[in-house]
Image (spheres, rainbow, N blue to C red):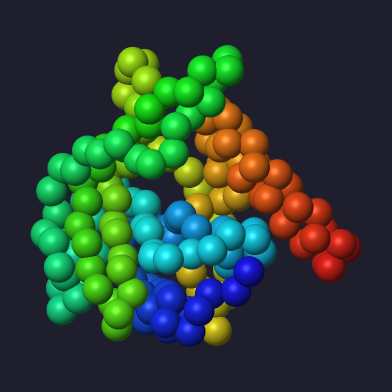
Amino acid sequence: MVLNSQLLGATVLIGNALMDCTNKWAIGGDVAEVISGVNVQATHIAILTTREGCDEITRKLAKFQIEPPRIVEREIERDAKVDLKLLKVRIKSYAARFDVEGSRLDVHGDFRIKVGEWDWGDSLEFEPDYVYVVGVKVPIVPLKMKRELYTGLGWLDRTSKIHEAVIRSRHMFG
């Protein structure tokens, strides 16, 4: 439930490099959950932002860029479970990829999700929560939004892990 030193170092470097971003952005994915105390294993960093935010982040992190921003659509490994049916999940975003000191960073602008044959959802909108990671103030995607998203996808194991982290944090600070 802790970030390995490589991901931690990259997260701090990214937080410092993007401190004065004019576009809204936040760390999402498993790294945000680990930072929030969720018991998951993180392998790379993901940032959610807007299309303009992706371009701004690409400029600020240019020396780490591997793939320039472009529209990317792909099927994720995990299916949604809706009404006892398994449905494929697709994601689409204006995305760029970076290698920040050995850690993979995916930046997703205007991130959207499609389940099965349903229409594409709207771009994810949220107000980030802020946390300090080794003294650097970093925006993260709120657990509340992730819990709602995972519930909708039928990923009850993940909603349960978020619930446990929230209970633990209330107990520690409570």
**169, above or below 15, in the image:** above
Instruction: Count the labels in the image.
Output: 0
Left/right of residue 166 with respect to residue 134 in the rendered view: right
**Quarter occupied by residue 58:** bottom left
**Front one among 83 and 123:** 83
Compared to residue 87, the image places residue 34 above or below, namely: below
Left or right of 120 in this view: 40: right
Q: Residue at x 57, y 15 (%)?
A: 83
Q: Quadrant of the N terminus?
A: bottom right
Residue in the foreground of this view, choosing between 68 and 39: 39
Q: Position of residue 140 (x, y in %)?
A: 50, 59
> In the rendered image, is residue 161 in sight?
yes
Q: Quadrant of residue 56?
A: bottom left
Q: Residue at x 43, y 23 (%)?
A: 87
User: Would residue 51 be found to the left or right of residue 46 on screen?
Assistant: left
- Say which quadrant the C terminus sits in: bottom right
**Residue 12 in sight here:** no
Q: Position of residue 141 (x, y in %)?
A: 50, 53
Image x and y of residue 14, in percent: 36, 75
**Residue lying at 44% horizontally and 32% vertically, measured from the top left:** 79
| Residue 68 vs residue 42, the one in the foreground | 42
Q: Locate residue 148, reporting x and y percent.
A: 59, 35
Judge whether 78 appears above or below 16 on screen: above
Please report the residue visible at 55 percent of the width from the left and 44 percent of the height from the top.
Answer: 146
